[in-house]
Amino acid sequence: MTDKILLKIAEEFGTPVYVYDAESIKMQYEKLTSSFHKSTRFFYAAKALTNINILKYIKNLGANLDCVSINEVKLGLKAGFSNDKILFTPNCVDLKEIEEAMALKVHINIDNISILEQFGNKFGNSYPIFVRINPHIYAGGNHKISTGHIDSKFGISIHQLRHIERVMKSTNLLVEGLHMHTGSEIKDADVFLQGLEIMFELAEHFPDLKYVDMGSGFKVPYQDGDLETDVKALGRKVEKALTDYHKETGRKFQLWFEPGKYLVSTSGHFVVKSNVIKQTTATVFVGINSGFNHLIRPMFYDSYHIIENLSNPKGAERIYTVVGNICETDTFAWDRKLHEVREGDILVFRNAGAYGFEMSSNFNSRLKPAEVLYLDGKAHLIRKREEFDDLLKNQIEVI
Ligand SMILES: *Cc1c(COP(=O)(O)O)cnc(C)c1O
């Protein structure tokens, strides 16, 4: 999808608008799946981007689905994923939500001893489950997206293995899968291998184990010089580790992964308009018609998104600080070199597919943007821009 097409989409559907290029999702999916043994299963982590059309598109590519809430499970079923292709990996939910997932017959991943016990007492071995392990590996781009370290709320600590075993023994639990997800944006792929070795050691304690789910953390580059996880090399190393393990023990597991960002990040282009150029004593600000209510990653994770001026691509380069229109500091980029930005110019944020629209809100009573899917050479509106009435939709006037 070219920048010319993006400009046309901005003209037709207005800004701000999230535009997703289907072809890019397909490319990323194929790059990933072709790097691993064909028995490997990939569960798209829905939380990165849940528009029903994206879910359907990814389902049609052949992927499975990883869901962190019961509503994501329902969305997945609505998108056409069969229940055996859905894994429910919630965190800190009550048994009721787990039971709802049972009723929908999806794979269930339990991440704390309390629920494990409640589940075992009530259902015994009548419904096989996964156990989410916290391996205490520090991995991931920054503290907020790291989930496997010792202070993390995710998973059951490997040091509690004896406790898990006791629950299994006393309740007859059937554990068919082990899961770990150590964080997002893992730069060093050996973290996965380290994790896999831990899984092999744990496997001794789980006689019914069929699946080993290594979660995600596949990294995509956000700026020049950034790394992308070398999935080809990882695939080879993982394959070797599994073969060696098989030779040593005679056991075989199906390997699962849960890529979110890797599949949808690069597909997304967040297109906005420059409202105001504001020269202060120290800085030239570009004030755009969006804010962290639409794209929170820069403020929340200090993340970097490439920004480009689509409507003045040949203008002289100048240094700008790009900010939003929210009444709270919402800086998207400091001291960024952009082709001269004039009021009314159309700018784009790259790599906005993952955790972009999905984390948007109505802060400042601003409306959520539209979403457009570019598929087979055509732009399709896949979510209407919100309207004023949407702000009041669930409010009840009592005064
Ligand atoms: C968020 C999440 C993922 C996806 O992580 P990415 O970095 O987007 O690939 C996978 N599995 C679980 C359990 C998650 O919570």
Image (cartoon, rainbow, N blue to C red):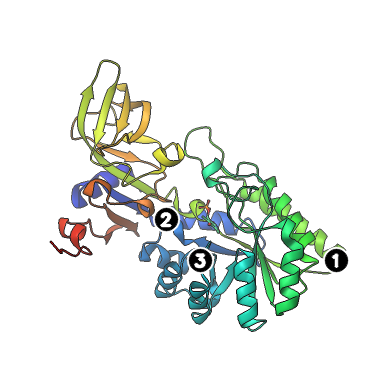
Q: Nearer the viewer, mark 2 or mark 3?
A: 3
Relative to residue 83, is residue 359 depicted above or below?
above
Relative to residue 263, is residue 144 depicted above or below?
above
For the image, the number of numbered tags is 3
Is residue 329 or residue 107 the one in the foreground? 329
Kindly identify which numbered label has been placed on residue 93: 3
Q: Are marks 1 and 2 in contact (CB under 8 Å)?
A: no
Quarter of the picture holding the C terminus: bottom left
Q: Earlier in the sequence, mark 1 or mark 3?
A: 3
Q: Amino acid at mark 3?
A: Val
Q: Earlier in the sequence, mark 2 or mark 3?
A: 2
Is residue 29 or residue 91 the one in the foreground? 91
Q: Are marks 2 and 3 in contact (CB under 8 Å)?
A: no
Q: Is mark 3 within 8 Å of ligand 1?
A: no
Kindly identify which numbered label has been placed on residue 249: 1
Residue found farthest to the left = 399
